[in-house]
Structures are given as C-alpha cells and as structure tokens.
Image (cartoon, rainbow, N blue to C red):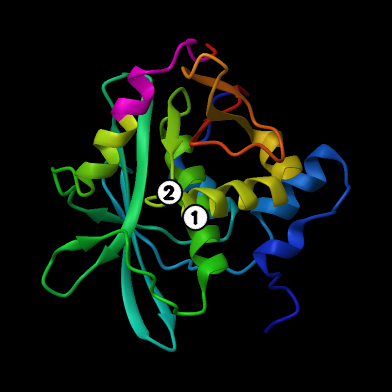
Amino acid sequence: MKQKGAIKTAAELGIKLKVGKKPSGKVLFPEKLAKANEMLSKLKNPLPA
Amino acid sequence: MPSSVIPFRKLLGHSASTIESQLLFLNMKYERYEHIEVSTDFLEYEFVSIGPRGNIFKIVQFKPTENIEVFNLAFGNKKADGSLDDITKDDNKDRNKILATVVLAIHLFSAEYPTKWIFFSGSTPERTRLYRMAITLNIEQLSIDYEIYGVLQDLESSLVSVPFQKGIDFFGFLIKRKKV
C-alpha cells in the first residue's frame, strides 16, 4: 500500500492544511541542528534500516 | 471544553484493537492547534499559541542532518522582530496542546518523508525529560505507527541508540514511520 501524503493524511484527520508558505531556505535553529549532528556523529551503532 | 476534545495526557490507558487505537490517537479531536501553515516542501509548520500571555507565533522546522537518513526536529517562538527563540518558557497554559500540535507536524512530515528518521531533543535537560514523559504516556499508541528509539550513553561513555524504554534518561530521541 502506498504511503499517504501529508494533505491526504490531514484530510483524514479532519484538518484543513494551509500549504503554500515559502520555505525559509535557512536553518532556523542552528544550535539545535549542530547539537543533533554532534550527537548523531557519536552514535556507535547504526540506525535500523 | 467540548466532550469530543480530550486532553493529550488522557490518552494514557486506552486498550483497544490496533486500528481503533490508531483512530483514537490520530483522528479524535484531542486538544491541539489545527490552523497550521505549512511550507510547500512540508518541512516547516507555523501555528499560533493562544493563552493568557496572548498570541505567540510558533514554528516547527525539520532540517536534514549530516546523516542523509535523519532530519532534525526543532521548534520555538517566532518573535515580532523575526528572530527565533527556543529557550524562553511562555507559560501560555497550553504546553500539552503545543506538544500535541508538534506531534501532528511529525505525523504530516513523516507522511511526506516516510523513509526518514526524525531526531529531537530538548534545548534543556528539563525539556528532554518532558518529551520523554510525553512519549512514555503515549508509547502504546505511538508504537503503532512509529519505530521509537532513544539515545543514551553506554558503559564505555559512547552514545548508542536503543529501542525506547520507560524510565531511562535519554539524551535524545529518534523516530521513524513504520513501513506500511
């Protein structure tokens, strides 16, 4: 079965999404991303497939 | 509060069939903000927190990490001057409603990017514990749709990811939509 997209998923949840906002094109929370990259780079075991 | 609206925390304890649990968790109108503005790439979600402190603009962003299989989830306040803040406590009396809305954003993102992992942690240890509590309270329902892992330190002080378990003080969390 094909995965539903976000719009269809939202519709099934009774939510009308307003899709159209232009992506900001930048990292809005750079410290959080840096922390994530640091943590992920230190992971000893690979993520499950 | 309408009888059809259920506070997020009260989802604990429901024991139904798999399909009914999924419907309960996702389709029922538990408290969350539903007027969400979404970017065309489904990576940014904006909504407004409404409470005693007024209207506070919230933004959720999923950003690719250096691991191409993992997106980082971050969210915070969008201030009037355009700057962003993920530290300040708003105290707008809607913490659980905000969390439920972020969960909704996760579900919508993962509908568009079903093969990607989502990593998130709190900007403070207290917030990481809050997220751990939220996952713990809803683990049965979340596990229907998601693989849920936590990041912790092993005996050799390395970081490892393990399936989420209650009672462990994780540094961060990794979730991914289960294959349909």
State which quadrant residue B130 falls in: bottom right
Three-letter code for the amino acid on which mark 2 is drawn = Gly
Q: Position of residue A38 (x, y in %)?
A: 30, 26
Q: CA distance from mark 2 to mark 1?
A: 7 Å
Q: Position of residue B10 (x, y in %)?
A: 75, 64
Residue B122 numbered mark, or none: 2
Secondary structure under tag 1 reads helix
Label 1 belongs to which residue? B126
Q: Position of residue B30 (x, y in %)?
A: 65, 66
Residue nearest the viewer, comparing A43 with B154: B154
Residue nearest the viewer, comparing B138 with A9: B138
Q: Position of residue B46 (x, y in %)?
A: 32, 61
Measuring 11% from the left and 72% from the top, which residue is drawn there? B81
| Labels 2 and 1 within one chain | yes
Secondary structure under tag 2 reads loop
Nearer the camera: disc 2 or disc 1: 1
State which quadrant residue B11 falls in: bottom right
In the rendered view, would you say B162 is above or below B15? above
Which residues make up the magenta segment? Answer: A37-47
Measuring 71% from the left and 70% from the top, which residue is drawn there? B6
Q: In the rendered view, does B108 fall on the left or right side of B75?
A: right
